[in-house]
Amino acid sequence: MRVLVAVLGLLVGVGCATPTASSARDARRLRALEPEFSAFVAARLAAIDDIEPAVARLEELRLEYLDALSASTTEKERLLALLRIAEAHLDVSARIRRIPYPAGLSTSARSDFDAALSARALPLEATGLSLLEQLVRHGDDAGIDGRFVQRARLYLRLHTDAHLADDDLDVLRLELTASSFRAPRSLLDAGRIGQRAARR
């Protein structure tokens, strides 16, 4: 919850600054975080012991994006920073849900293992989804419907298992072929948002 309060304060407190030469600096700063973000979402969680280091790395990454958010001078950069924080939460929660079963687990023990993973993933997922909702509200309030707001809407639709409209499919195609600030592919694949990330 502290994450949501901090981010809302940053979005409201910064206001609608006029783009200046510093907006190029803001974009460079966010571009410089891309390798860290890509490495984070590519890391595999092989065992339950991998959760704590992944959550610690999530916290470090979140703070870096919050710094970028607070220093940003344009709405586009602020929305991207917020989106990346949400995506990192959703991605790690999906990876937690898919940690492989330890060898030799019975069917009932597997069910208990999945429940334990779900308990660890749910708070991260809830934070990610709340940030997406906040991003969409902020975009609506500011009259912004750019790529990052559209991507947040797409994630929310995928999470609710809603039927994707043609506009949603257009956004999905755009994100799958984007050359910069790509969506984590794992979050666009079926079955990876929220509860849908659980094993079937």
Image (tube, rainbow, N blue to C red):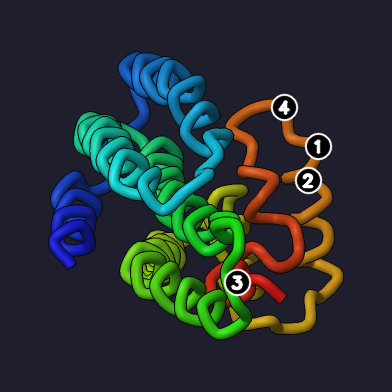
Asked if residue 41 lies left or right of residue 75, the reply is: right
Label 1 with label 2: CB-CB less than 8 Å? yes
- Residue 173 image point, x, y percent: 83, 50
Element type at mark 4? loop
Going from N to C along the chain, the mark reached first, 3 or 1, is 1
Badge number at residue 198: 3
Hey, what amino acid is under mark 1? Thr
Q: Residues within 10 Å of mark 3 (few under 14, many from 20)?
A: many
Label 1 and label 4: CA atoms lie apart by 6 Å
Image position of 79 with respect to 2: above or below: above
- Residue 55 image point, x, y percent: 31, 46
Label 4 and label 2: CA atoms lie apart by 10 Å
Badge number at residue 174: 2
Q: Nearer the viewer, residue 21 or 189?
A: 189
Q: Which residue is mark 1?
A: 177
Element type at mark 3? loop
Hey, what amino acid is under mark 3? Ala
Q: Residues within 10 Å of mark 1 (few under 14, many from 20)?
A: few
Going from N to C along the chain, the mark reached first, 4 or 2, is 2
Hey, what amino acid is under mark 4? Ser
Q: Residue at x 57, y 69 (%)?
A: 105
Image position of 119 with respect to 32: above or below: below
Tell us which disc is closer to us: 3 or 2: 3
Asked if residue 21 lies left or right of residue 88, the reply is: left
